Image (tube, helix red, strand yellow):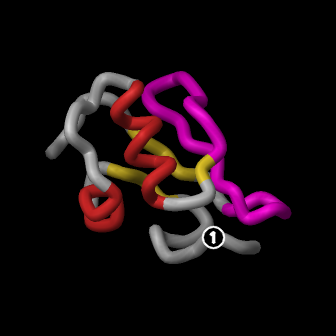
Amino acid sequence: MATDQPVVVYPPAADGGRRVRVAARFVGMAYTLVDIAEFLGRAGMDEVEASDVRGAAWIEWRGGGPGVWDH
C-alpha cells in the first residue's frame, strides 16, 4: 500500500516510544508496530497491519528502523 500522505516515525524517546506523524499532523506515540498500524487506520489508511508497517517503503524511519524501540 502506497500513500500520498508522508508517514514519519521519529527516533525513540527516553521511554522507548516513537512519535508518529502522518502528513503535517502528529497522530500519537507508538510503542509497537501495532500502535503505528492503529494510528494509520485512524488517519484513513484502511486495513494496515503491523506486518505492513514493518516492510513499508513509504514510511520514513528516523533514528532506526522498525526494530528499534529504545534509545
Tell me the residue at 27%/31% (across/down): 45
Question: Where is residue 65 drawn, in percent x and y?
Answer: 48, 70
Circle 1: element type: loop
Q: Residues within 10 Å of mark 1 (few under 14, many from 20)?
A: many
Tell me the residue at 55%/71% (across/down): 64
Residue 36 placement, left or right of 15 = left
In the picture, residue 19 is in which quadrant? top right
Q: Amino acid at mark 1?
A: Trp
- What are the residue bounds of the magenta stretch? 12-29
Question: Is the residue 65 above or below the residue 6 in the image?
Answer: below
Question: Where is residue 52 drawn, in percent x and y?
Answer: 25, 57
Question: Where is residue 4 drawn, in percent x and y?
Answer: 24, 30
Whether 15 is among the magenta residues is yes
Residue at the disc numbered 1: 69
Residue 42 placement, left or right of 51 = right
Whether 18 is among the magenta residues is yes
